[in-house]
Structures are given as C-alpha cells and as structure tokens.
Amino acid sequence: MIIYSVVPPEQIFDGLENHHPQYKEVKLSNGATMIVEPVSLTEGKIVRLISPRAEDYLNPRYTPGNRIFFRPDGL
C-alpha cells in the first residue's frame, strides 16, 4: 500500500501499534457465520464473512464495516 499525503507518516499511523481488537465469531439464526469486532454487548462491526452459502456474500447487510445485532453467549 502506498499513501501519498502531506501529513507525516508518524501522524497517520500514530497509535496503530496499540490497537488490539478482540474479534468474536458470530453465527446468525439464518446460518450465516461472520467475524465481528464487538462494539457493545449485543452489537458488533462485521470484519469478515465466513459462509458456505453464496447468497450471503451477495447480501449487502453482511458487507464488512456494517454493524449487526447478535445475542450474547449464554443468553
């Protein structure tokens, strides 16, 4: 990746080495499985879709970066 910017690289990448997200695998009721970065107890940001069904990849709701609601473990 090449970044062309007038902003110094130290300022662009400041804090990147301290970012350690906790990912969680979530399986939805319709069978779609995805990796999410939890935002709250029941909400997460989609990081990666893992599904054997092709129609899940065509669903715009499952695009990485979107937020989904899910049931926490044990409830």
Image (cartoon, helix red, strand yellow):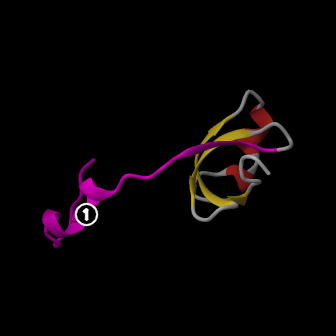
**Toward which corner of the image does residue 7 lie, by quadrant?**
bottom left
Is 46 left, or right, of 71 in this rendering? left
Tally the marks: 1
The residue that appears at 14% across and 65% down in the rendered structure is: 10
The residue that appears at 58% across and 45% down in the rendered structure is: 24
Is 20 left, or right, of 3 in this rendering? right
Judged from the image, the secondary structure of the residue bearing numbered disc 1 is: loop
**Toward which corner of the image does residue 8 lie, by quadrant?**
bottom left
Where residue 73 sits: x, y (%)?
72, 47
Where residue 23 sits: x, y (%)?
52, 46
Q: Amino acid at mark 1?
A: Gly
**Toward which corner of the image does residue 33 lie, by quadrant?**
top right
Question: Which residue lies most toward the front here?
Answer: 74
Main SS of the magenta part reads: loop
Question: Which residue lies most toward the right here?
Answer: 30
The residue that appears at 74% across and 27% down in the rendered structure is: 52
Write down the region rendered in magenta: 1-28
Nearer to me, 25 or 33: 25
Q: Is residue 30 above or below residue 20?
A: above
Question: Which residue lies most toward the bottom here?
Answer: 6
Q: Report the residue marked by disc 1.
A: 15
Nearer to me, 73 or 16: 73
Where residue 13 sits: x, y (%)?
23, 61
Around disc 1, counting alpha carbons within 10 Å, would you say few (fewer than 14), some (14 to 19), or many (20 or more)? few
The residue that appears at 76% across and 39% down in the rendered structure is: 32
Residue 12 highlighted magenta (yes or no): yes
Where residue 41 sits: x, y (%)?
65, 62
Q: Is residue 4 above or below residue 35?
A: below
